[in-house]
Image: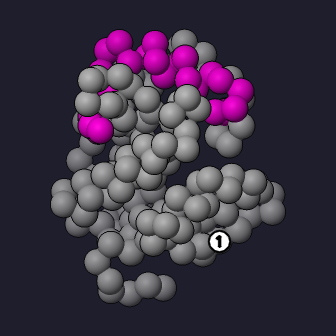
């Protein structure tokens, strides 16, 4: 599996799998248009990510043969905290690709950036994502009744966990 920055042409696959009903069920969108896909690729290309506060980026998740099967979101909250998100084409669910992609993203973060804390929010009904995060060492720290979501945190380098 390869994680890379989005590039021109990825908007076709982004639109294809992000627009599936089963994929969008646990995301912040219900429909993902071709225009939104194109805008996401354009934004990523025009805003290089350096890990500074308020910066964000999107990475493609591909198989070794180049097939794009999903994407990862990375956003800097503060000098010590990042938030992540992940979307995988439903054709590839249950095969371990999501876990491998998030594990790779966490390794990249740890090797490249000084941030210690990684946060991920998931919808309460998303049992697969909950298992994935718990298996990777995340701990639940927040719950929202308004958004029906849960927050999970992972500390990469020990330190203050408050």
Q: Image point 58% across, 62% down: which residue? A: 131
103 magenta-colored: no
Q: What stretch is highlighted in magenta?
A: 1-24
Q: Position of residue 156 (x, y in %)?
A: 33, 72
Q: How many labels does the image show?
A: 1
Q: In this view, does 17 lie to the left or right of 56?
A: right
Classed neighbour count for the residue bearing mark 1: other residues with Cα under 10 Å, few (<14), some (14–19), many (≥20): few
In this picture, is 147 found above or below 70?
below
Q: Image point 45% across, 72% down: which residue? A: 137
In this picture, is 64 found above or below 152?
above
In this picture, is 28 found above or below 118?
above
Furthest residue toward right = 145
Q: Where is residue 59 in the image (x, y as percent from the top left)?
A: 35, 36
User: Which residue was labeled with disc 1?
Assistant: 142
Q: Image point 64% across, 33% down: which residue? A: 23
**Residue 44 visible in the snapshot:** no
Q: Where is residue 89 in the image (x, y as percent from the top left)?
A: 53, 30
Image quarter where the N terminus lies is top left
Give the structural element (helix, strand or loop) at label 1: strand
Q: In which quarter of the image is residue 42?
A: top left
In this picture, is 130 found above or below 116?
above
Residue in front for this viewpoint, 18 or 8: 18
**Residue 31 visible in the snapshot:** yes
Furthest residue toward left = 111
Q: Where is residue 18 in the image (x, y as percent from the top left)?
A: 58, 26
Q: Is residue 41 left or right of residue 23?
A: left
14 magenta-colored: yes
Q: In which quarter of the image is residue 15?
A: top right
């Amino acid at each position: 599996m390869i994680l890379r920055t989005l590039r021109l042409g990825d908007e076709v696959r982004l639109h294809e799998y992000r627009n599936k009903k089963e994929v969008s069920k646990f995301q912040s969108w219900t429909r993902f248009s071709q225009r939104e896909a194109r805008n996401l690729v354009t934004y990523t290309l025009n805003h290089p990510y350096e890990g500074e506060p308020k910066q964000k980026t999107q990475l493609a998740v591909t198989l070794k043969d180049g097939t794009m099967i999903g994407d990862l979101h990375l956003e800097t909250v503060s000098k010590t905290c990042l938030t992540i998100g992940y979307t995988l084409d439903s054709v590839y669910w249950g095969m371990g690709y999501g876990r491998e992609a998030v594990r790779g993203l966490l390794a990249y973060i740890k090797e490249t950036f000084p941030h210690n804390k990684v946060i991920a929010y998931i919808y309460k009904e998303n049992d697969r994502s909950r298992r994935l995060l718990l298996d990777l060492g995340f701990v639940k720290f927040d719950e929202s009744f308004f958004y029906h979501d849960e927050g999970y945190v992972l500390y990469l380098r020990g330190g203050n966990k408050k």
